[in-house]
Image (tube, rainbow, N blue to C red):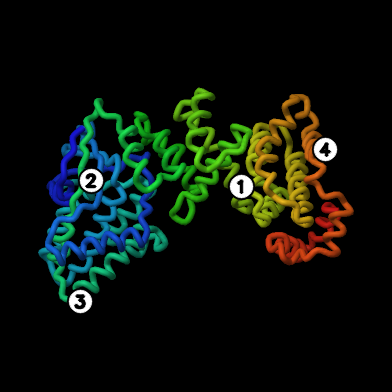
Amino acid sequence: MKADTFNIIQRLFDTSQMILKIPVYQRNYDWTEGNVRRLLEDVENVIKNKQQYFIGAIVYMESDNNDLGMPEFLIIDGQQRITTLTILLQALKDLCVQSDQQVLEMIDSLLTNKYSSDEYKIKLKPIKSDNIQYERLLNGNLDDMDYNGHIYKNYKIAKNIFSNWINNGIKPIEILLALKKLQVVGISLKSGEDDPQIIFESINSTGVALTNTDLIRNFLLMGDQDQDKLFEEYWLPIENKLRKNNNNETLDLFFRQYVITKSNSTITERKVYSSFINLFRVNNFTHESQLKELNMYANIYATFLYPNNSNYNDKIKGYLLDLKQLKQSTCYPFLMHVFKDYENKIIDEETLSKVLSLITIYLIRRSICNVPTNSLNTLFAYLYVRVFKVTNNKNKYYESINKYLFSQKNKDEIPNDENVKYALEHENLYQNKELCRLLMLDIENNDFKEKLILII
């Protein structure tokens, strides 16, 4: 391992022919408007003070890929800054199309390999889920871009700010020279000697916190010789199903629910990653077998989130929509077990529907009577393993769940019929927005009478 300080654009992009590859285990490009504006403030200070400016550290390793005919560097850490700098360069380049051909050509030589084939024309290669948008940006196909994505949004911010600077008398060459004065500490790793995962986790432990999704992806893909295959066949489909709004929030929730399902116990957010690693080792998973299982559970979880996109019958979709309307995701770890049993043909569609009805009505009754929800996490974390610790109970699947859920052990948590009737007559249910929306939807769909009979 070797570390030194250098100007990032001059060192990494001034080389006439080269590839900077962001490995598939890295997080998606997720710099926000705030991140970009702070970097542009730094650039403005460089223009004013004419001094070098330090923007952090990057870690990279020269690849063993000798088929390219040019150097290839893997970016182990720092891909957010590197990607953003190239977006800034593209924004500046596009402003120079009509006004400054010299600066345009200088930037073009930084971003592209002039004499390479189309496959290797662009120097920076983000991970596949970002690369489509990135290539469209650098190729000028703005009409085909995702206008809600970070790449396009940050490009527009940079272009607008650069345009204001130019209108106020700052020349494009001054902006380019300022970008070239941004410095980093570059840590160069040697293949076969340095462990990139240990260094990556060490550096990020003191920086912006990685999400559980980032950590799990790094663990499953970093260092695996088949990482590109695993990413394409397993990880990317999981992302496509569950990663929404350019962030990991839904994926993080999924991994927490997965760990709760597998461990049959409650898990705090900060222990998700360590619990995941423990489950991986206890179950003797390989990276591929773990990703296969995650993909299966991701299909189930996507059904909970988007019932109307599933292939289940209308009754099952209806119960899942009810649970979503109630915002009762606490039952998902239990339901992941149940849906897995359905997929494995342990139960049929009718039994699945009856179990969903039972859980839905149970939660609605509690909601009507305003029973505190703090015990639900624990209940649904261990419900499946408690019910089916007696293997023969699977022969009486619905009945066993019903018996346990409404047993004497849980009597303080379960409103009786009189409590429910009283609450329906006297309580201000309109204060419960989720419940009101659900009941209104039932009225609109002519399902209210049937639902009310089940509730009471």
| Residue 303, disc | 1
Residue 141 seen in render: no
Q: Mark 2 or mark 1: name the one nearer the start of the chain.
A: 2
Mark 3 falls on what kind of element? helix
Q: Is residue 138 above or below residue 26?
A: below
Query: Looking at the image, which is closer to me, 221 or 447?
Result: 221
- Kindly report the distance in space between the C-alpha atoms of the residues bearing marks 2 and 4: 65 Å
Q: Closer to the camera: disc 3 or disc 1?
A: 3
Q: Is residue 310 above or below residue 407?
A: below
Q: Closer to the camera: disc 2 or disc 4?
A: 4
Q: In screen coordinates, is 382 left or right of 111? A: right
- Amino acid found under the numbered disc labelled 2: Tyr
Residue identified by numbered label 3: 167
Query: Looking at the image, which is closer to me, 124 or 381?
Result: 381
What percent of the width, then of the height, locates residue 118? 23, 49
What percent of the width, then of the height, locates residue 169? 15, 75
Name the residue rendered at 20%, 48% in the picture: 184
Name the residue rendered at 60%, 32% in the picture: 263
| Residue 329, disc | none
- Kindly report the distance in space between the C-alpha atoms of the residues bearing marks 3 and 4: 74 Å
Residue identified by numbered label 2: 120
